Amino acid sequence: MSEIPARMKRNLHIVLPVALFLLLRLPSLVEPQWYQDEAGYASTVWLTHLGYGLYANAWNNKPPLLFGIYGLSQLLFGTSEAGLHALTMLSGLAAIGAAVVGMSRVFSLRAALWGGLVIAVIIGSPMLDADLALPESLLIGPVTVAVVWFLCSCADPAARAPRAFTLVAIGVLLACGFLIQQTAFADFATIMLWCLVRRRWRTAIFIGGTFALTVAVVIVPFVVSAGAHNVWYALVTSYVDYVGDALQGRLPAYLLRIAMVAAMVVAAWFFRNAKEGRLELVRIWATALLFAAIAAGYSYEHFLLPAMIPLTMLVTGLVSGYRDHLVARVRRPRVLASGALFAVIASTGWSLYTSAYRTTVWSVGYYFNVAGYVSGSLSELDYDTYYGTLTYGEHLAEQWISSRGLVGTTAMLWTNLAWPLVDDQLFPPTRSGPLYVTLALENGTAGILSRMNASPPELILVAPAGIENLGDVRSFLRTHVYREVLDAHGIELYVRAGG
């Protein structure tokens, strides 16, 4: 028995961060279905179950593996929110485990402990939406394992040449991240850039080739089934338009981002002979991921989530390894240049930081809200309302639909929170669940109403707040003889006369 405490003490740098992570993440298992992006991904999977082809009929701009994960969750746990969040918890565990092990091998056990605790707070709490089943929270597991594995087995100058199996496995993990969301290309580019400036040709070829082959094996079947133009638009062109909308076609904004990428390459070249090669890899990684988070020009706090792990590792490495002579090292021209580059990139993300601050403040109330609900001092209505005004209303609508035996009927959801589509297995007349996507795909309200005119659905769910052309929707309800059966908490539910 005495061996157990001794073993725990030896592994305290792993045990404490993992325990803190689990403690902070447990409340996510009792969250309601409240986030519209989760509803969008889940409804896309539901449409594919109905026979809609991904990227052709069931449209979304995320890569296939994300929907594979959602499909796995639905297979194992049904439409349970806890099931989805359990998978994000596994991804977070993989990320924090890899980061702590990497820091313990590259820096020190003490550094790994403190760095691990910081990472546990960031990815364990909802301050950057890590509790949600978003691409960022799902991809941090495979990409962190991949980069840290490379850091420990391939970037150590004293180590022997890595085995082909190791390089292939790293390539597959990086590809998995990319197949969850395209922004994970930054993790792959980090390793490629580090290898290329150091002329590690064998390593670059194995990892790069495996990455490309894995992506091709997954994507090509969808190219065949949906058409190359549909897949290209979903995974590439739509993102170009997405960034263009944020940057509003301003040439200086594009030129600044091109200059940042070029500067990152130049900085890596100047540091190619650095003695601290592994710390340089972490620096490139942190800089690349921060750039990827900021470059799109949007202020969604979860964009920052993947960058927080390498950033924490970088700060931990600098403080633990060079705190006694940090000032002297900072004065070196190359260090000043790389630091200035990082500062320039970071200075363009103030809207992201503001959003992250608001979510961090919200997170404090999040834990009090969960404690009140679990203890019974807070009603389900009050608990759900903390997440959004529509959450409880949609829950009541789902209950009404199932109690009337209307599960599996046709329905149009005029709301961005499309969970009733999935929970009650409804058949929509459109190619998407969330309203904001459907409006874009069908060229506005008129396009949607045209589809509904051709085949009026049995049910129509409306969230009036914020809907454009609401008068046209209400006119459709009147002319097609729908009757209102529910009006509660921001949700209205209508059924066709005789339904």
Image (cartoon, helix red, strand yellow):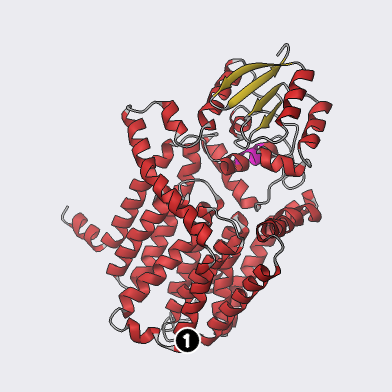
- The residue sitting at 39% across, 51% down in the picture is 124
Location of the C terminus (image quadrant): top right
Q: Is residue 393 above or below residue 348?
A: above
Crowd rating for badge 1 (residues with CA inside 10 Å; few <14, some 14–19, many 20+): some
Question: Could you say which quadrant of the image residue 254 lies in?
Answer: bottom right
- The residue sitting at 60% across, 56% down in the picture is 181
- The residue sitting at 74% across, 52% down in the picture is 222
Q: Position of residue 468 (x, y in %)?
A: 70, 36
The type of residue carrying mark 1 is Arg
Find numbered disc 1 in the image and state the secondary structure of the residue it sits on. helix
Q: Position of residue 236 (x, y in %)?
A: 71, 59
Q: Position of residue 253 (x, y in %)?
A: 65, 68
Of residues 414 and 7, the one drawn nearer to the viewer in this rendering: 414
Residue 139 falls left or right of residue 247: left
Pick out the residue farthest to the top.
Answer: 498
Of residues 486 and 208, the one drawn nearer to the viewer in this rendering: 486
Residue 23 falls left or right of residue 233: left
Give the residues in magenta.
42-46
- The residue sitting at 37% across, 65% down in the picture is 101
43 magenta-colored: yes
Q: Is residue 255 visible?
A: yes
Q: Position of residue 119 (x, y in %)?
A: 38, 59
34 magenta-colored: no
Q: For mark 1, what is the residue?
A: 334
Q: Is residue 43 above or below residue 215?
A: above
